[in-house]
Image: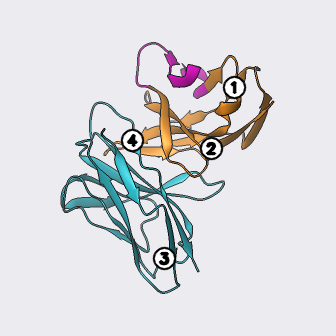
């Protein structure tokens, strides 16, 4: 079955360390997105990519980095520059035009300890 | 920029009662609107979407939504709520290029048995 997979489901990081969250999709979607979710704030866009080897900053990109070397993969790195990284991170994929609406992964909960 | 407002943070209904979750958007042209549902610790699932045409949209799990341009609203409804509908609900609108979704802050639904 086609879908989008995020791993790991839970992740613990020490302050000052970088950590990478994985996102893989086999839906043949061109576009992929990373959102951060905090209680009471909804989902906020971190980065998105519409094509391989290209990506754009979203609303809260500071302290994060991404890469898009393959169509299927869009990993997110939370760097030590991110001041408040503890959150629930959601990856999504979708078509660039036409059938709007995303397919979401099941999320990664990152906790800084 | 387009935005979405969900004025109700929490709503509690009795099982079997009707439900209406409010969503207001700000956008000059006809927006592309969505409703998603999220169970605790999970990703988001698309309930329904509106692009154009019939203003009453049917979705999965017995949900429907009505687009009202005059009120800038896209409220989600269900005639009879089931205990399994307890979740968080997000309204979203497509913003700009790249098929980016802007989400509301969500409404947490509690269902009393």
Q: For residue A25: magenta? A: no
Instruction: Write down the residue under mark 2.
Output: B106
**Parent chain of label 4:** A
**What is the crowding at mark 2: few (fewer than 14 residues within 10 Å), some, or many (at least 20)?**
many
Which chain identifier belongs to the orange chain?
B
Q: Secondary structure at mark 1?
A: loop
Contact flag, marks 4 and 2 (Cβ < 8 Å): no
Whether B69 is drawn above or below A77: the answer is above
- Extreme-bottom residue of the structure: A16
Quickly name the residue at label 3.
A82
User: Is residue B65 on the magenta stretch?
Assistant: yes
Q: How far across and how far down the image is residue B113, in percent?
A: 81, 30
Q: Which chain is cyan?
A: A
Q: Which residue is mark 1?
A: B82
How many neighbours does mark 3 have within 10 angstroms: few (below 14), some (14-19), or many (20 or more)?
Answer: some
Q: Which residues are magenta?
A: B50-75
């Amino acid at each position: 079955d086609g879908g989008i997979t995020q791993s790991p489901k839970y992740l613990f990081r020490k302050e000052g360390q970088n950590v990478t969250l994985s996102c893989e999709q086999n839906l043949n979607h061109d576009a992929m997105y990373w959102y951060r979710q905090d209680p009471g704030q909804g989902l906020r866009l971190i980065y998105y990519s519409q094509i391989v080897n290209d990506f754009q900053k979203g609303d809260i990109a500071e302290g994060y980095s991404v890469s898009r070397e393959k169509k299927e993969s869009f990993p997110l790195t939370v760097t030590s520059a991110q001041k408040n990284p503890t959150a629930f991170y959601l990856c999504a994929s979708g078509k660039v035009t036409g059938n709007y609406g995303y397919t979401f992964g099941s999320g990664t909960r990152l906790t800084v300890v | 920029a387009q935005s979405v407002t969900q004025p109700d943070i929490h709503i509690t209904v009795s099982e079997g009662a009707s439900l209406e979750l409010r969503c207001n958007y700000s956008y000059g042209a006809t927006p592309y609107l969505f409703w998603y549902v999220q169970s605790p610790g999970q990703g988001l699932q698309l309930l329904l979407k509106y692009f154009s045409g019939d203003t009453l949209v049917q979705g999965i799990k017995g949900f429907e939504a009505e687009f009202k341009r005059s009120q800038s609203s896209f409220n989600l409804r269900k005639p009879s709520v089931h205990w399994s509908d307890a979740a968080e609900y997000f309204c979203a609108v497509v913003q700009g290029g790249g098929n980016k979704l802007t989400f509301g802050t969500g409404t947490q639904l509690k269902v009393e048995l």
